[in-house]
Image: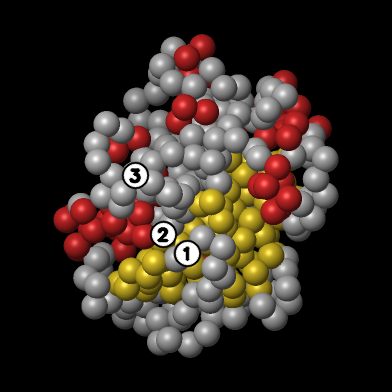
């Protein structure tokens, strides 16, 4: 049985963001914790005992403490049910949480060679002693079975595939440690329980919905998809930045080329937006944008949402 827990649904900065006074952040501060969202990550398990994370957000310590499934087992002095972390990109909001996992428990970091090269180039990640924390490269379109810390099979299969995107913003204008050519900076994942055949997709960053991507996810039981901005020029119109969503590597929810319209004709049972920026009005439960999202069959999840496939 495949279990998935949404650890965080927000984009970088979370909701409310510490220095932001936009409508969404103001509403979160004044309406209690209903609107609070931590930065995007999910955990999944095939047996309910051993778990893998997809991305390690800067909010990871908070997320783990808020998720009973990921607590140390009763009576253990030191223990974690986390067997591995799979990275889909090298942005700060996908890798910074690794530094909160430096206390010596064994697990494996799975990532494309380009992302591993970025980690290797930054000595701060050496706090994750490679005697305990293995770094295993993953290849595009080559399925693999992540292992448990003792080497046992997990019963899960992970397939990574390239999606349109870009390298981390902090590398703009700099040489990429993993080389400038080729895919690998932005991945989507297909996670399958080998025993049941149940699967879900995770695509937290995507600059364009291509026909190839549509063909990949058509017929899926569950898709987590990039919901960073409602409209492409949202950050500019809100006075919060000078970049469009697409220039940051994120397709908008709305518009004829947006995720809602481009994926409308696919047979997906459950569609969930995550990596939602604090500027996105679809976060607000009573907004017209939220109503449009829900009318199109999409969900905005709360942190802690668990789904069983």
Compute the Cα span from label 3 to label 2. Answer: 14 Å
Q: Residues within 10 Å of mark 3 (few under 14, many from 20)?
A: few
Residue drawn at (40%, 87%) of the image: 150
Residue 83 appears in the rendering: yes
Labels 2 and 1: the sequence-earlier one = 2
Q: Is label 2 in a helix, a strand or a loop?
A: loop
Compute the Cα span from label 2 to label 1. Answer: 6 Å
Q: Which residue is mark 3?
A: 180
Contact between labelled residues 2 and 3, with CB atoms less than 8 Å apart: no
Residue lying farthest front? 181
- Residue 159, above or below 216: below
Viewed as shown, does residue 195 lie left or right of 242?
Answer: right
Give the number of the disc on residue 70. Answer: none
Q: Which residue is mark 2?
A: 112
**Circle count:** 3
Residue 37 appears in the rendering: no
- Residue 277, above or below 119: above
């Amino acid at each position: 049985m495949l279990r998935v827990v949404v650890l965080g649904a927000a984009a970088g900065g979370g909701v409310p963001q510490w220095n932001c006074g936009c409508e969404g952040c103001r509403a979160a501060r004044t309406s209690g914790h209903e609107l609070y969202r931590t930065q995007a990550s999910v955990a999944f398990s095939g047996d309910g005992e051993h778990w893998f994370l997809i991305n390690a957000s800067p909010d990871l310590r908070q997320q783990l403490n808020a998720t009973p499934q990921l607590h140390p087992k009763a009576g253990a002095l030191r223990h974690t049910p986390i067997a591995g972390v799979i990275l889909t990109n090298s942005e700060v909001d996908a890798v910074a949480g690794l530094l909160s996992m430096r206390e010596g428990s064994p697990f494996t970091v799975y990532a494309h060679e380009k992302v591993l090269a970025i980690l290797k180039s930054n000595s701060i990640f050496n706090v994750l002693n490679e005697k305990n924390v293995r770094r295993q490269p993953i290849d595009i379109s080559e399925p693999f079975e992540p292992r448990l810390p003792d080497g046992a099979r997990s019963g899960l299969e992970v397939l990574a595939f390239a999606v349109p995107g870009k390298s981390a913003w902090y590398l703009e204008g700099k040489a990429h440690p993993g080389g400038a050519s080729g895919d690998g900076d932005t991945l989507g994942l297909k996670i399958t329980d080998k025993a049941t055949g149940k699967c879900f997709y995770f695509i937290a960053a995507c600059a364009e919905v291509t026909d190839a991507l549509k063909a990949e996810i058509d017929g899926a039981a569950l898709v987590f998809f990039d919901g960073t901005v409602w409209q492409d020029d949202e950050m500019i119109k809100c006075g919060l930045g000078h970049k469009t969503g697409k220039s940051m590597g994120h397709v908008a929810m709305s518009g004829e080329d947006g995720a809602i319209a481009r994926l409308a004709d696919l047979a997906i049972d459950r569609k969930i937006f995550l990596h939602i920026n604090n500027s996105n009005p679809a976060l607000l439960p009573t907004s017209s944008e939220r109503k449009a999202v829900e009318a199109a069959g999409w969900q905005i999840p709360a942190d802690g949402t668990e789904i069983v496939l």
